Image: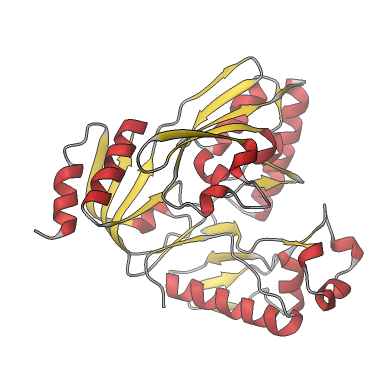
Amino acid sequence: MPTAQQAQARLAEIPGLALSARFPLARCTRFAIGGEADLYAEAGSADALAAALTAARDSSIDIAVIGDGTNLVVSDDGFRGLALRYRAGRIACAGNSVSADAGASLDALVDFTVERGLEGLETLAGIPGSVGGAVYGNAGAYGHSISERIASIRFFDGSQVRTLDNSDCRFRYRESVFKSHKQWVILAAELRLDPADKAALRRIAGGIVEARNRKFPPTLQCAGSIFKNLLLPDLPAGAAAQVPASTVREGKVPAAWFLDVVGAKGAQRGGIRVADYHANLIYNADGGSAADLCALIGELKARVLERFGLELEEEVQYVGRFA
């Protein structure tokens, strides 16, 4: 019996796991591109998630744990294995401490804290995706990141549930320890916030959502900014010397500045296009493919490398095989 069929049989027996075969992963990504997964499952509890991971591992099939797909690029050929999504979404608070399951939406968490007059996450308002994805990539905006408020993270390491405190998560700009331990799956986050005026928090969050929706309309099939911004001290000397001082924000240089200089705006490959108004926004304009997207990303990286001697790094994560 092929390994995928063995895994399917075992997975079908797990309580709290919704299982599908030949599932189109384009439905799970904001780019709306990508082929089918051999198997797709949604786990409603930590026990179901752990059981699914164990069953897939024992059946020797590949595993891709995905969140809300906002930063995901799936191969046109799909994924030969199990795509697994954690859907537990409980959010609760006790005083200034807030706990959130990894499957909860980040926006729901922000709204929860704002409505309770708890300060610390309001600048993340409007960022799409799940809490788990936000922790994994240390999501942030307007000079703040979710790591500033993380007390601890509970995760499954492949054999048992463990907890890491903030320092052990090794948070950096758009980075965490979980990116270097792909087998670790985030289950929940514990956050520490500060009491604040609810009306003031609402104004801040509302203004940020309004600005974000102008820049990244909710109906736009995109992942937000495609490339990470760059830390000024890490730039090659020649490139750093060319960056206007007015462009630097909190020690970072927007990737959009380098892309703008090399003429990225309006560039297109197949149905994938760079926005005319923002050089770091790539979207699916008209039935684009993952191959189109990767080709355009590669072209833009090559332009910046040739002009500035630096390589841009994507914020998006890739699932499946790519040329």
Residue drawn at (17%, 49%) of the image? 8
Quarter residue 33 falls in = bottom left
Residue drawn at (41%, 78%) of the image? 323
Q: Is residue 29 visible?
A: yes
Residue 72 placement, left or right of 95: left
Height in image: 269 above or below 99?
Answer: below
Quarter residue 226 falls in = bottom right
Residue 222 placement, left or right of 214: left
Instruction: Give the image's coloring scheme.
Output: secondary structure
Outermost residue toward the bottom in this view: 306
Residue drawn at (66%, 74%) of the image? 311
Q: Nearer the viewer, residue 299 or 27?
A: 299
Q: Is residue 125 visible?
A: no
Height in image: 97 above or below 276?
Answer: above
Height in image: 21 above or below 262?
Answer: above
Outermost residue toward the top in this view: 95
Residue 49 placement, left or right of 265: left
Q: Nearer the viewer, residue 27 or 63?
A: 63
Residue 252 lies, in percent from the top left, at: 79, 58
Residue drawn at (71%, 31%) of the image? 120
Outermost residue toward the left in this view: 1
Q: How many circles with numbers are drawn on the protein?
A: 0
Residue 73 lies, in percent from the top left, at: 46, 62
Residue 112 lies, in percent from the top left, at: 59, 25
